[in-house]
Amino acid sequence: MRHKKVAKRQIEADKIYNNLLVARFINYTMKDGKKSVAQKVVYNTLDLLKAKGLEPLETFLKALDSVGPKVEIKARRIGGANYQVPVEVRGDRRMALAIRWILEAAKGRPSKEFHTFAEKLVAEFLDAIEGKGAAIQKRDNMTKQAEANRAFAHFRF
C-alpha cells in the first residue's frame, strides 16, 4: 500500500510584526481555536513592553532565546535498562520548548499581582531576560539533569 506524501503546513508570519515566531507564539497561546483572542493577548503583551520603553520584538526574541534549552534528556532502553541520555536540542524544538515553558510559567503566576494574562507574560519575559523566573528555572533543571547524565552521552539516538 502506497502512502501519500503529506506536506507540512507552513505557518504564515503575523500581520503586525511580520515575524514567524510571533505567529507561532500566538498559535501556542490559542485555546479552543480562538485565534483572535490569542492575537489580542500577544499584541497587548508586546504593546505593554513598548509602553515600558522596550523594543517589543527584540525583547520577545531575547526572552525566547534565553529560555530555550541547549540540551535535553531522552530515555533510551538498552539491554533491559533505561538510561537518560543527554541530547542537543535543535532550533525548532528549542523554540517550541521555550514558548511552552514561558506560557506555562505565566499561567502559574498568582492572579493577585496581575490583572490580565498579558501582564503576566510581560513579567515572565522580563524575568527571562534577567535570568530568573519559572521558565528559566525549568531550563536550568533540564540542563542540570543532562549534565548529571553526561556519562550516558555515548548512547546516541
Image: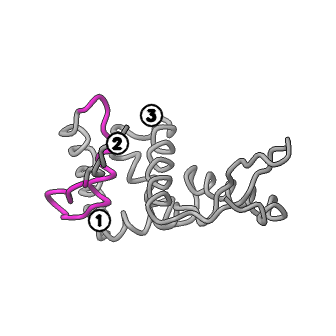
Q: Residue at x 74, y 59 (%)?
A: 144
Residues at badges 2 and 3 in contact (C-beta under 8 Å)? no
Q: Name the residue at 64% across, 57% down.
A: 72
According to the image, label 1 marks what residue?
56
Q: Is 92 left, or right, of 151 in this rendering?
A: left
In front here: 1 or 61? 1
For marks 1 and 3 on the same chain, the one whose residue lies earlier in the sequence? 1
For mark 3, give the secondary structure: loop
Residue 81 lies, in percent from the top left, at 85, 43
Residue named by callout 2: 3
Nearer the viewer's eye, disc 2 or disc 1?
2
Which label lies toward us, 1 or 3?
1
What's the CA distance linking mark 2 and mark 1? Answer: 44 Å
| Type of the residue with mark 1 | Pro
- Residue 144 versus residue 6 in the image, above or below: below
- Image point (46%, 34%), residue name: 112
Query: Label 2: few (<14), some or many (≥20) within 10 Å?
Result: few
Question: Residue at label 3?
Answer: 111
Q: Secondary structure at mark 2?
A: loop
Q: Position of residue 106 (x, y in %)?
A: 46, 44
Q: Is residue 111 above or below residue 40?
A: above
